[in-house]
Amino acid sequence: MKKLDWKSFLFGAALGVAPIATVAVVSLTSSEATAQLWGRFRSQAVVAAPGQVVVCSETSVDDGAKLKNEEFPASSTQWTRGFDDSWVAEELERHPIKKIDDNKTVWNIKGSQKEGHTYGNYTEADALLWKKETERLVAEGSLIFHSADLLGSKNGVSCDMCHPDAEGTHAETYPKYQVQLGRVALLRDMSNWCLTQPCRGEAMSGDDPRMRALEAYMHAMRSGKPMKYGKH
Amino acid sequence: MSRYRRENLETRVERERSEIFAALKRLDRRSFLKVAAASWAAATAAGATFGSGAFQTLRFVGAQESDATSTNASAANAANVENGASNANKGVRVAYISDSHLYVKEKNDRFANALVRAVADVNALEEKPDFVIYGGDLAQLGSLEELRLGRDILSDLDAPLKIIVGEHDWYLDLGDGWRSLFGEPFWAFDLKGVRFVGIMSVLEDDFWTARKMTPVERMQTVAGLDNGVQNRFKIGASGLRWLEETLADCPNEKPVVVFSHSPLYALYRPWNFWNEDAAEARRILSRFDAATVIHGHTHQLLTHREGNIAFHGLLSTAWPWPYPPTGVPELTVQMNRPDPFNPNDGCGDGELRISPDGLVDKIYRFWNREPILVPAAYVAGDATKRPKRPNLPSY
């Protein structure tokens, strides 16, 4: 069972075991059960009301299939939502991030629905969801940026030691011809250089969830700097 | 009236040069050759010390002329020149090393090697320093093992060592380890008419008890420059009282040099490039004709002046920091941004040369760049003595 891809598993569980699940959740409130199913299957945070997120730390979809957070493969965690994310608030208190766009310009635009525009159908609740989810990825990046262990650093060196608040990462200047490398570098190439040289660790693949999170953090923290690719 | 106006660097150079030439005229041929050889050696030493680039050497020979001629003067004295320039009190020379952030050896040899290099640098100085100041943050995570490693490396210094405490040295055991190795973090002494004071300026109010942090978590929190959970540095009421009492017997004319890990002026609060008590400390120092505060912690070239108090930063041996987004003093000629591909770029050590009247020439001796001299005359307001701007902006 564990070999099975967890998404396929849940997909099957949701379809095939739906009747069982319906029976099984009698003891739970139906909204919680739906939330659990929905949360896992669609990978979507269930926002009952703005700010209120149903936490699905453990599923009871079918008997014997108790899937805990830590059993999910690391590569999937950034796509899953609705799990215990109290660590996000803690991380953001430790390492405050730049303010995210509030997207007020696309809330409830009058008349847009009549004209058939998609924009304008969004509400404040939507914008809160976007904010929450985006900040979570940024917070994940922050956690990695500040942790030699999560970075796989071999000598205790983490990104923040030279780049407090991601200062000096110049994420807004990539891609650029990195003279010292003799080729055009993306931000991730430079990050990998730092990982392998000053940190003496292993390079990460470009779609490593840690690398994605690191990029999210650096871009967030360089927010407001004029985008100027190629700048030295 | 400020002491800065009594004799500036240039007039001193001119005076010493004319004294040397006057002395030379009175020499017999044999003594003349002796002095000439010494002068040549001194000039070469100045050139060699200040980088191999010919242009840089010329630039710095100009700046260093007072030293070169001082050396000549001692050579002249050796040649029994009665009327040569006096070297009875050439002021105090202090070498500095700072912010090595040592991990235990097994974890990170790089930072330890950097400190070894700095010690070798200081030992190799042509003119021996009167003492060496270590500017704090010897350890990275405050363990006794890290502090011991630092002490062992620093014990190779030829000159006496004075050391101040940084936050990385303190917050694992709140100073127990530090005290067992280095004694009290507040100290003062007089040397050649200058009062030197070391203070502990990285005190933080308790943020750890309420959060139920372990000592290791507390240390890691303080070790993060951009960690917002910790409090801001201060000297504290008892520390300030100690400072005032320690300086109470100093007349206003006596030069005072204070060593503090945190900068005692408003630089950048979010990174604790800051001290909550700085204004009070400056008030205590404001009565002196020439006071200087030397601070570690910031890992970069910084120059500032408020009234008669001059402020200088120290280089780190471990890594350089980018300048904070705001708050860099106007007087600071920012160092070029470090090259990440060059493991020691932006790092280094350096010297303070304190004249008998308390003026401080500050030398930043970068390991991979030409050194930068921040002359006392520039800090005092002579814009023509401004250090050369780097060729790239710091952004």
Image: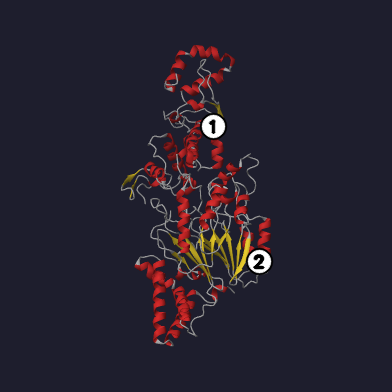
Q: Chain of mark 1?
A: A
Where A88 falls versus B77 (above or below)? above
Asked which quadrant contains residue B57, the reply is bottom left
Q: Which residue is mark 2?
A: B247
Q: Secondary structure at mark 1?
A: loop
- Asked if both marks, 1 and 2, belong to the same chain, the answer given is no
Mark 2 chain: B
Residue B202 appears in the rendering: no
Taking depth in this image into account, of B357 and B42 the one nearest to the observer is B42
Q: Which amino acid type is marked by label 2?
A: Leu
Left or right: residue A44 compared with residue B248: left
Which residue is tagged 1?
Answer: A85
Which numbered marker is on residue B281? none
Question: Is residue B71 visible in the rendered structure shown here?
Answer: yes
From the image, state whether disc 1 or disc 2 is nearer to you.
2
Q: Position of residue B45 (x, y in %)?
A: 41, 70
Q: Residues within 10 Å of mark 2 (few under 14, many from 20)?
A: some
Are the residues at dot 1 and dot 2 in contact (C-beta closer than 8 Å)?
no
Q: How many marks?
A: 2
Q: Secondary structure at mark 2?
A: loop
x%, y% of residue B38? Answer: 41, 77
Residue B394 appears at what percent x and percent y? 43, 55
- Tell me: B302 left or right of A195: right
From the top left corner, tell me how far across and down residue A40 is, in percent. 48, 23
Q: Is residue B205 above or below residue A83?
A: below
Q: Residue at x 56, y 58 (%)?
A: B263
Residue type of the residue flagged with mark 1 = Asp
Nearest the viewer among A189 and B279 is A189
**Alpha-carbon distance for marks 1 and 2?**
54 Å
Residues packed near mark 1 inside 10 Å, few (<14), some (14 to 19) or many (20 plus): few
